[in-house]
Image: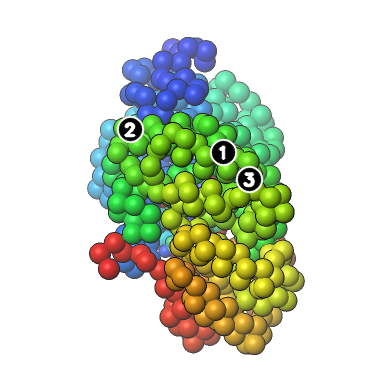
Amino acid sequence: MTTFLGLPALSSPSQPAAGARPGAATGPVAGRPTVILAYPKIDHEKDYVYHWMPFSLLTLAKPLIESGLVNVVLFDGNQRDKQAWEAFLDEHLDAAVCIGVSIMTGGGQIGHALDMVHAAKKRVSCPPVVFGGPHVNVLSEQTAVHPLVDAVLTGPGQNSILQYVQSLLGRLPRRLVPGLRIDDGEQVLTGKPNPPRTGILGAYPWSLLNVADYIRDDPTVAPRTLNYVSSQGCVYKCDFCYEKIYKRKYSAMLAGDLLDDIADLKQRFGINGVKFYDADFFVNLQRAMGFCDGLVERGLDLRWAASINPNDILKARKKGLPLLERIAESGCSRLLMGVESGNDRVLDEVVKKEITREKILDVAADIAAHKILGSYTFIVGFPGETDAEVEDTYTLIEELRQLDPVPETRVHLFAPYPGVGELWDKAVAMGFEPPDSLEGWSRFDYYTSLTPWTSEETAARAREATRMRLAPAR
Ligand code: B12
């Protein structure tokens, strides 16, 4: 392992301090080791027009930069190609203390990750490669044993990456690194647990990326829309969902901090739309209302979109909070909601959605009455789901499409997420054979029929019922 002499003191950061306005200069400081963070390409759906920011890695970069211990550089494989990765390695590998790679299951990202690491490992100066991200959080062991992987970090990376780097620099014993797992073939080294509470997000180090590359014309939001993530985790129990790994713990930015960040982005990059990619933006109703009120009070004049659980709307009603009014007044143009099924047995027993078909229709009508575009997603092909139950989903879609504005609808095929919920066990018991290696997972495609009980006909019907306003040009 490379050793570094003359390391700067931990307490003397010269890169921006915690809470500094995002995007303040994060230029490299001479003599410091570098942490390379890599976001491998995702093979987007055909005709996909959007650009996504690697918020996972921006979140990790923050504590590293704030420590003053290392320089951080970020490579986004969704923006740059293989040749650019080679040039990036030429520039940064010699000073690198490690390469951190983020992977999620599906979308071919794992395969691209392996290609990138393979290219790095061909070079003599390649430092340890550590994997993290949603796929690692569900299959850490399988990832850790892969020959191209030196270590994995499970759980929220902002609470482990600095400690991992410190351990590489000989400043911290490995057993104190949260979520660490190293499998060198002879022994397995594990660190202390990394709890699911993620801590506060936001004030992302934007200067690690060219923000302009991520601004897009979104026909459902605004011509200059940027993505944003303001919370992690979710309090609901939906049995198919990856968010269960957070054990229903939810961490979110305060409304004021979020507004400060958004105002700053508007001022510096001229954005006029924000699309939130929080699992559920509205878990904390007071925060959500505070955000809406703040947008109006500050005169930010933005359009925005976010995901909501139908129960958030019902809870707000119970508390007498005018949630949808405020959402609409503050410029929200679109609410995305996982409806999952139109059948009450499936909603209750299979999905554990804690909602009924009748209430979904009620909530969707309320959204439409506020002139907000509803975007509803469904899943068909659950283990044990009958044809009649699937039919209920399609009749619900037809009913929803009578609303004005006519909602978007998207039908997904059920894909078992490794290790998440009873549904995974049921799927395996019913003959679903999960891949047993990273190579296998790299070919796992959520948009084709994955389970033995799902026919090509079912898949074709789901595609047909998917009606989204995707491309601005259309
Ligand atoms: C935005 C997004 C996308 C974007 C791309 C993301 C990007 N940056 O390029 C798009 C739209 C392209 C996308 C696509 C897909 N996505 Co997606 N996506 C998300 C979403 C909504 C937000 C991701 C995010 O930025 N989160 C915020 C950051 C801060 O959290 P994070 O990514 O989890 O990272 C934390 C940890 O995982 C860890 N970590 C992450 N990377 C690393 C790396 C290292 C080294 C370390 C130490 C730690 C670490 O630390 C981070 C900070 O706490 C999540 C759901 C969610 N709310 O997280 C789903 C999610 C990641 N997507 C998921 C999936 C399955 C997909 C798809 C494969 C399928 C689908 N139907 O959506 C497709 C792929 C497209 C295709 N053709 O097949 C799943 C992943 C499940 C899994 N087991 O991996 C998620 C969790 C959604 C869900 N609840 O099911 N997605």
* Mark 3: amino acid: Leu
**Which quarter of the picture shows residue 317?**
bottom right
Residue 292 location, x and y as percent?
Answer: 51, 43
- Is residue 361 among what the camera can see? yes
Q: Secondary structure at mark 2?
A: helix
Residue at (34% x, 68% y) in the render: 46
* Mark 2: amino acid: Gln
Q: Determine which residue is flagged by label 1.
A: 290
Q: Secondary structure at mark 1?
A: helix
Label 1 and label 3: CA atoms lie apart by 8 Å
Count of numbered circles in the view: 3
Q: Determine which residue is flagged by label 2.
A: 267
Q: Are marks 1 and 3 in contact (CB under 8 Å)?
A: no
Which mark is on residue 387?
A: none
Q: Determine which residue is flagged by label 3.
A: 285
Label 2 and label 3: CA atoms lie apart by 27 Å
Residue at (43% x, 80% y) in the render: 464
Q: Left of 418 or right of it: where is 28?
A: left
Q: Secondary structure at mark 3?
A: helix
Q: Dot 3: within a 10 Å radius of its alpha carbon, few (fewer than 14), some, or many (20 or more) residues?
A: some
Residue at (46% x, 78% y) in the render: 465
Q: Are marks 2 and 3 in contact (CB under 8 Å)?
A: no
Q: Are marks 1 and 2 in contact (CB under 8 Å)?
A: no
* Mark 1: amino acid: Gly
Q: Left of 451 or right of it: where is 97?
A: left
- Is residue 338 among what the camera can see? no
Label 1 and label 2: CA atoms lie apart by 21 Å
Residue 82 location, x and y as percent?
Answer: 28, 50
Quarter of the image with the C terminus is: bottom left
Residue at (49% x, 52% y) in the render: 328
Closer to the camera in the image, 80 or 190: 80
